[in-house]
Amino acid sequence: MARYGMLIDTKVCIGCYSCLLSCKRQNGLASDQDFIRFEDRERGSYPNTLRESIPLQCMQCEDAPCVSVCPSGASYFGPDGLVSIDHGKCIGCRYCMSACPYQVRTFDEEKGIADKCRFCAIQTLSGGKGCSCVEACLTNARIVGDLDDPTSELSRAIAQKNALPIAGDLTQAKIFYVR
């Protein structure tokens, strides 16, 4: 089975929010709910500064703190290795939200459940339409694929661009960034 991951190249991301809006539409999210959030950061020293938009979403951590703290088993590792949520088991305690070091979990007030990026890469790699955030990206800043396949576009891009997890070794994240 594939070990799904993603690369996000912040050097080409223009912060247009197309990924966020596409994800919102695909997942039927409320206006106050997002699976992707943006952080704008400045790097460098005056007068040589650079502003970058960094899209953040569930990092699909192999050692996901949100899974280990969930008292009901609603947050779990699916057979594909991705972090999933069984909404029927979620008791709305928000422990997963507190445990996520990336602060990318959301809470659906209407349903009283926690939620997050569902990483629709499974659809992409099994012949479905594809990850909406990847499909919507105007600058091709996102690549999704199998981390264990050294010939995949994703694995080659991670190696060529020296992409790394956004927070180093904080967790074993499957989302890699070019910065």
Image (spheres, grey):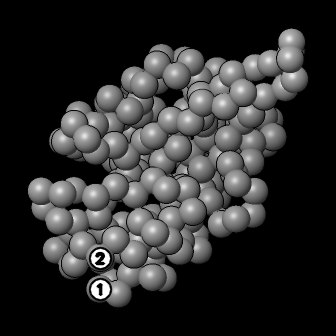
Residue at the image point whose x is 38% and y is 51% from the top: 117
Q: Quadrant of residue 161?
A: top right
Instruction: Identify the image quadrant of the C terminus.
Output: top right
Q: Earlier in the sequence, mark 2 or mark 1?
A: 1
Tag 1: Cα neighbours inside 10 Å, few (<14), some, or many (≥20)?
some
Residue highlighted by disc 1: 72
**Of 114 and 137, the residue lying toward us:** 114
**Residue drawn at 78 percent across, 28 percent down:** 43
Mark 2, residue position: 93
**Residue sticking out furthest to the top:** 47
SS type, badge 1 = loop
Residue 163 shown left or right of residue 3 in the figure: right
Look at the picture and state if 162 lies above or below 5.
above
**Mark 2 residue type:** Cys
Q: Residue at x 53, y 74 (%)?
A: 65
How many numbered marks appear? 2
How far across and how far down the image is residue 55, in percent? 53, 37
**Farthest residue toward the bottom?**
71
The answer to whether mark 2 and mark 1 are in CB contact below 8 A is: yes
Left-right relation of 86 to 106: left
In the rendered image, residue 172, in percent from the top left (x then y), is placed at 65, 66
Task: State whether residue 82 is above or below residue 38.
Answer: below
